[in-house]
Image (cartoon, rainbow, N blue to C red):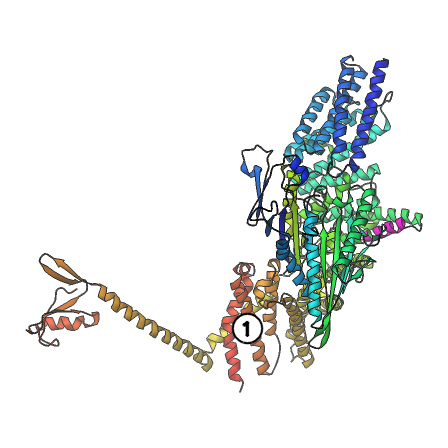
Amino acid sequence: MTIFRESFIDIQNKYNKVKKLIEEDCKTDPENEPYLSKYTARELLLTMKANIDNLLRNCIVGTKEHLRLTGMLAATYLYMGMIAVDTEELSAGEKSLIQCQEIVDKYEAEPEIILVSLNMLNQFGILWSQRDPKKSKLYLEKAISLYNNFKQKALTPYDIDDLFKLNVESSETGVQSLEKVYTLTLYYVAQIYGSLNDALKSAIYCHITLKRQLESGNYDSIDWALNAATLSQFFMERNGFKEARHHLASSSVILDEYEKQLNILQEQSEEFEAKMENFRNRSADVSRCWAKYGLLLLSVSRERLLDSSDEMTKISDLTLHLSDLKLDEITASQIDFNDLTFTSLKTTFYESQITDQYILTLQDAHKVFYNTQTWLDKAHSYYTLNALASDYIDILLDKSQLYKNLLFFDDNMENQSKMQKRRADLLEKVLKEVNPIYYMQYCRQMWFELGEIYCGILDIKMEKIRECKGRPSAHALNKINHLVEKSIQHYTSFTDSFKEVTSQDLSKCVDKDLQKPFLQALFHIAALWSRFITLDKKVGLENINKSNEFYKKVIDYCEANPEVGQAISAELSVCKEMVNLLPVKIMKLQQEIP
Amino acid sequence: MASVKVAVRVRPFNQRELDLEAKLIIQMQGNRTGILNCKANARDESIRYKEFTFDYSYWSHNKESPNFVSQEQVYNDLGTEVVDCAFQGYNGCVFAYGQTGSGKTFTMMGSPEEQGLIPRVCKSIFDRMVENSMKGTTHRVSVSYLEIYQEKVADLLKGHNSAVRVREHPKKGPYVEGLTTLIVTNYEQILECITRGNANRTTAATNMNDVSSRSHAIFTITFVQAGYCNGIPSETVSKIHLVDLAGSERADATGSTGKRLKEGAHINKSLVTLGSVISSLAELCSEPSGYRRSFFIPYRDSVLTWLLKDSLGGNSKTIMIATISPADCNYAESLSTLRYANRAKNIINKPTINEDPNVKLIRELREEISKLRALMFNEHRSDMLAKIHEKEAREKELTEEWTSKWREAQAILREQTALGLRKAGPGVVLDSDRPHLVAIDDDPLSTGVTLYHLKVNINYIIICLIKERCIRGTFGKRIASLPYLY
């Protein structure tokens, strides 16, 4: 027995060394030999294997001891496999893992072996992920069912480390390790679904991973909150507003808890400051995710009202229809998919503040508007213009969008016009503050949007003039001309921004992705020139000439770059007709001028 | 428009590779670079040999080769453009990327005998400054040097470990709060700053394991030109960023270089990366349309691109040089470097404009078009319309006149070819496939035969002539015979 004891201690020492090598030492490997520690560990594992084999030969099959040694041997192969995979020797890794599998085969669900089995299946999953994700999925699914079967037996598993310790029985760490390895399995499944382009299932497994992190208490608050908020963005894009809202609310709850912890600390140290800064930064990010939720809810509701007036009878709620998913039998029976919630969190406070249903009335829209605006203001309190300009502008653009989404629900033209004006004020104010050299991308977006906004107000004012029966006042007409001018001015800033110092030829310097908006802007300018109201025929003639000139620009550009013409075919055909017909008008005007 | 140029350069074998009797696995032809996998014994050539196309493929493997690319050529191709750009007031960016020991430093810094890009760029800036100052322009050059490690920014000119924050000013663009900037007046001072920064980088490296291969370093030259433009004082500020990107061997799939690797199904093993798994999931559902994103993904790992955003895009010039080893033992690294370089153009964020569909406007314009049309048709009596028609008709007439003239001339030419003269037996046969009259002259002085082709419009007269048996008629004394009539 002493011989056994001695050899066992020898193996234990070697095991500890291996663990140290692959967990700590490998981080300080020299640059030119990045796998030095792992190779050393591999050598040690080989001798360990021989030692364990020796002990096994003198052991009676069926005893507790034999089982434990079997576990140790399997673990040795497992580590060899892991090292091989890490050092990019996939086929060698596979070989070791297959040997491991052969050893655990009959005992895979024994308390001594279960952790080796699950870790092994995870490693198979990783190994095959690079070759054939489908096969990888099979291994991971096997791990899921093995875990579930083991859980039903209510046994305490041995931690792998414990196998190598003399006189240690199964312990608490075994249970923790079991849960940890299972969480990893689910996390890998999430990624496999991602690579199989099944984004929804991937998202569901990400949710489960988050849920398990929460249950285990083993998570970083900021990371967790950020991940939940990011996942919400996925769900809402898939019309899963209920799920999205729940994830956002959970994110906020976790952040609130974290803030409380921080406030208790209240120490004056650099580290504390860094934590506070990170907290403020990430809270602002979660606020932005909330804001996007409100924005999307409004725009989805608008689109629904716009294009499905005949399908309105169909009541659809804004939750993901998970029951439609065809889930694999193994997993479906063991994981509750119909409930993507974090039950342990008290999320109702946040959830009660904003609906997860389609918006129908102005009143409902107002509620969403105010809530979203609050989140945007919160985000702006961190992302300020003077410190983080481009994020500031991004949020500002969301504010502009928010007004736009709201005004659809308001039938009052006066109100619509006011909201448009608010948008314009927001954007014009910041345009004065930023340097186009550094923020060109944002300036372009704002110029374009401003062109649209003034066009929008123009439409409303024209409508009003048409509605009122009497002659429009001079003031009203001046207003119209002012709006046309403003819109032209912003669209022109947009198109001029493409001019290069070196060449004035615009047809070559517009980025492919921006060609369409560029032509749209020209098209708008052309149409706008015809909208000036004037009694002076000379001015009128000039305006029509301008209009004609800009329609021609669109045509010329499309002739030089035929592929864009297809993208704006409707506009282009209008332009073509216009340049045919406008000369008639021009000639007529010319004749009328003495 | 932003321009990005990507170049790949291969270095000579180093001593270690020579000792190992390494095989050459890189091939370059024109702007293409190919890499051969010696180990793969697959029959499939696409697995054994992979080829990439870049803006430049620089063969600097052996000096004897006629295709050898010198430091000077690299500078001429890439460096001059950056300097030009800076003098025009735009920003420029030079990225160097590649495995440690692949010749990155040689390309960027070079040796005293063979200077690299940085010294040449600096020298050229100072030379041109001297030139321009004769014209009354004054200049100021300042430099800063920072390092990004694990998404934290450190000031390399400050000496001790000093974390700094990144900020973005509405007028001045992105900047690093409290970052040391030193005014320099010649290249030696710049070199001194680089050396000092590098020393700080290495000291830190002994504490943290091989930081240099996992961190990015950005050396920034800020360049202010002040002068009078049309009598008005003007000042332009431009920056040149020289970026040493994290070495490829450890810059793994978590995307420390900005963009995540999207190929293959590489599984992230640790839960630490759950964030990037979820982010890429959310990104997946973004439609590639021109619409503004309707969702927000908090950025996690892009301080580098964030800091450089004023120089990536707009009118700036971006250059990316990837360096590789020629040896088979570095196959995996070189391949990943080439792949990275191949995707390098993606580091520039594509700007998009959120536009509304023009349905309403188009409808209105269509209405206007029908009105204009109606105007045209209803005002037939209008002089204006008549004038237009008249003008159009006149133009048409003129062109038709001209074309018909041409047509006639052409017809005459064609007619002549329809006439054939051929030998038949002892005599000569003259024939034509068109209706014609042959005149056999009784004039003793005449020796020839005259053939008249009949124009369609005069056939009628001729038929009349025949009917009246009036052989001598308009044709005078000549006897006309009709070989055929249709």
Residue in view at x 69 percent, y 58 percent: B121
Question: Measured along the vertical axis of the image, is residue A276 above or below residue B483?
Answer: above
Q: Is residue A534 visible?
A: yes
| Residue found at the far bottom of this picture | A594
Horizontal relation, residue A500 to residue A5: left or right = left
Q: Position of residue B103 (x, y in %)?
A: 68, 46
The residue furthest front is B113
> In the image, residue A38 lies at what x, y percent?
75, 31
Where disc 1 sits, the SS reads helix
- Name the spot of residue A320 as percent of width and height, x first: 70, 44
Is A390 located above or below residue A209 in the figure? below
Number of numbered tags placed on the structure image: 1
The answer to whether residue B288 of the structure is visible from this angle is no
Residue A278 is a magenta residue: yes
Q: Is residue B94 left or right of residue A586?
A: right
Using the rendered view, name the quadrant where residue B419 is placed: bottom left
Task: Identify the residue shown where x is 14% and y is 64%.
Answer: B484
Q: Nearer the viewer, residue A21 or A126?
A: A21
Using the rendered view, name the quadrant where residue A145 is placed.
top right
Residue A47 in picture, x, y percent from top left = 76, 22
Of A281 and B128, which appears nearest the observer? B128
**Quadrant of the image occupied by residue A491:** bottom right
Amino acid beneath label 1: Asn
Q: Which residue is mark 1?
A: A548
What span is colored magenta in the figure?
Answer: A269-281
Residue B468 included in the magenta stretch of the image: no
What kind of secondary structure does the magenta stretch mostly adopt? helix
Query: Badge 1 sits on which subunit?
Result: A
Graded by Cα atoms within 10 Å as few (under 14), some (14 to 19) or many (20 or more), the crowding at tag 1 reads many
Q: Report the quarter where the N terminus of chain A lies.
A: top right
